[in-house]
Amino acid sequence: MSCLLQVRGLVKIFGALVATNDLHLQVMPGEVHALIGPNGAGKSTLVAQLAGELAPDSGSILFEGLDITNLPVPERVARGIVRSFQITSIFPQFSALTNVSLAVQARAGHSFKFWRDASTDPTLREPAQALLDQVGLGVRGNVPAGELAYGEQRQLEIAMALATKPHLLLLDEPLAGMGREEARVIVDLLRRLRGGPTILLIEHDMDVVFSIADRITVLVYGTAIATDRPDAIRANAEVQQAYLGGEMDHA
Ligand SMILES: Nc1ncnc2c1ncn2[C@@H]1O[C@H](COP(=O)(O)OP(=O)(O)OP(=O)(O)O)[C@@H](O)[C@H]1O
């Protein structure tokens, strides 16, 4: 099977710091692929380069066989690389349903200024309601987005990201700042998304990573030191060394 995303020899330097260091990565279609590594290993820097927010100093990124290394963010989104929690902007005064309707509308190529249409047009409302149902916010559609609980806003952002019909969904710490119950809702949602878009996930909660990832890549000092299935990663001596026997013990 040919890979969806291929990163070849990626390098990103900040002053004296090599944040991404000759990084190679392959993400296969349909998988949940987790990126883990100690603090400062370069996970977010990598995702920013995949999303097009940061330009690499060298190396290349191929997506669906096409070199996208120099494509700007909107063109990557149009090709199906979508980052949740960063690129989606919620309008807090609009209802959850209108927010998702706007995302559906944007995907269809219309301008955001027609938000009045977005809240009433059935061709936007119906898919938007289906997306709210999918993320577990089906009964919260009429609530202004700004009044949703923190975890619900993250669910809403996932619905808005899904509205763009992503082929690759980039999730950078989707559980950050959440309590136990809110995190459980998001983890259940990620499980339900299996079979949908390919997911590249940065997550510090090792229990979550090891229970939902198909494959895991471990970054250390900007380099991918291992990519494998969870059980093989857990047993990998170099990986255990990188974590100094800490977090991995609990995984
Ligand atoms: N814009 C920037 N300018 C300078 N240094 C940066 C910049 N962005 C990141 N860095 C540095 O690059 C290194 C990698 O940071 P990055 O945030 O990618 O790591 P991370 O693995 O995501 O860390 P964490 O798990 O703590 O979120 C760190 O040393 C960080 O301080």
Image (cartoon, rainbow, N blue to C red):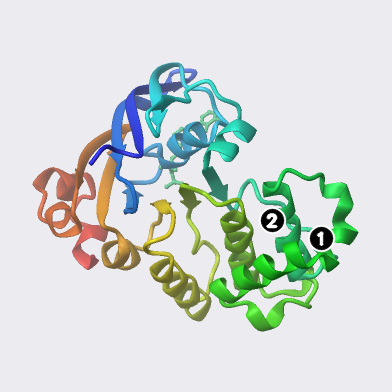
Dot 1 falls on a residue whose secondary structure is helix
Instruction: Assign the N terminus to one quadrant of the image.
Output: top left
Q: Which image quadrant for residue 16?
A: top left
Residue 79 drawn at (x, y percent): 53, 37
Give the mark, 2 or 1, whose residue is nearer the N terminus.
Answer: 2
Q: Which image quadrant for residue 195?
A: bottom left
Residue type, mark 2 in image: Val
Q: Which image quadrant for residue 212?
A: bottom left
143 vs 55: above or below: below
Seen in the image, is 38 located left or right of residue 156?
Answer: left
Q: Residue at x 58, y 39 (%)?
A: 77
Dot 2 falls on a residue whose secondary structure is helix
Hey, which residue is sitting farthest front in the picture? 123
Residue type, mark 1 in image: Ala
Residue 156 drawn at (x, y percent): 64, 66
Closer-to-camera residue (70/207): 70
Q: Would you name the residue on which mark 1 appears?
A: 118
Instruction: Assign the C terminus to one quadrant of the image.
Output: bottom left
139 vs 52: above or below: below
Q: Residue at x 33, y 32 (%)?
A: 6
Could you classify mark 1 by the number of other residues whose Cα lies within 10 Å: few (under 14), some (14-19), or many (20 or more)? many
Q: Would you name the residue on which mark 2 appears?
A: 104
Q: Residue at x 56, y 24 (%)?
A: 71
